[in-house]
Amino acid sequence: VVVGTSRGTCVFYDFADGTSVEVDCAAGGEVVVGRVWLDPTARHAIVTLHDALGRPVDTVYFRPGTDPRARPLPAVAAARVAVTAVGWHVAQCTALAALDVLVGTADGFLFELCLETAAPGAAAGAGAGKSKSKPTPETLFRKLLALTEVREPIAGLCVECVEG
């Protein structure tokens, strides 16, 4: 279970072993958690942060039980969208990646988001010729479609795989 707080943190409760971990999502800002989306495997969480008036200010990502601090999603911020819905593709969620995540926005756009993290213990930017800048978790954020009739928020998303 992940609970968002008015202090800009999320608390991850693991009922299997009776532990809880608080994750800083605000990075020092005066924000509250607006919404939390936890993938069905409980390995990935996306959180929207709002200001005191309820306006969205950021979208962050963390792995419950693994990451002590949430990380911003720069590509989402660069797109200047307010996330209102998330749909997880459960077959594409592993300990280190969440692929084919659908993201709905306040202005009626549907995006695809792919999240990948470095393997535990791997150095950021390790390897010849690679940048030493801090890696960001998202590897893809692309627009799939827009509701054209009426620009209204996407309120919910569900991803199901159909064989055949």
Image (cartoon, rainbow, N blue to C red):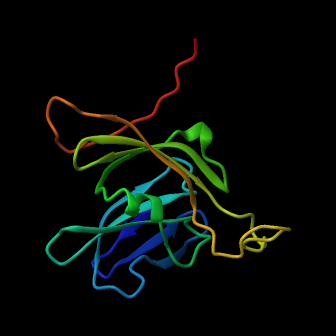
Question: Up-down: is 22 above or below 17?
Answer: below
Extreme-bottom residue of the structure? 28
Residue 132 lies left or right of residue 134; in this view the side is right
Extreme-top residue of the structure? 164
* Quarter in which the N terminus is drawn: bottom left
Q: Position of residue 39 (x, y in %)?
A: 49, 50
Question: Up-down: is 61 above or below 26?
Answer: above
Q: Total number of numbered labels?
A: 0
Among the 4 quarters of the image, the one containing residue 3: bottom left
- Work out whether residue 127 or residue 42 is closer to the camera in this orientation and state it: 127
Among the 4 quarters of the image, the one containing residue 139: bottom right
Q: Position of residue 23 (x, y in %)?
A: 48, 77
- Work out whether residue 53 or residue 80 is closer to the camera in this orientation and state it: 80
Residue 5 visible in rendering: yes
- Work out whether residue 164 or residue 131 is closer to the camera in this orientation and state it: 131
Residue 73 visible in rendering: no
Rendered residue at 78%/70% (across/down) = 122
Rendered residue at 42%/83% (across/down) = 27
Extreme-front residue of the structure? 129
Rendered residue at 29%/48% (across/down) = 105
* Quarter in which the C terminus is drawn: top right
Q: Position of residue 38 (x, y in %)?
A: 45, 55
Question: Up-down: is 20 above or below 103?
Answer: below
Among the 4 quarters of the image, the one containing residue 2: bottom left
Residue 30 lies left or right of residue 53; in this view the side is right
Extreme-right residue of the structure? 128
Residue 23 lies left or right of residue 65; in this view the side is left
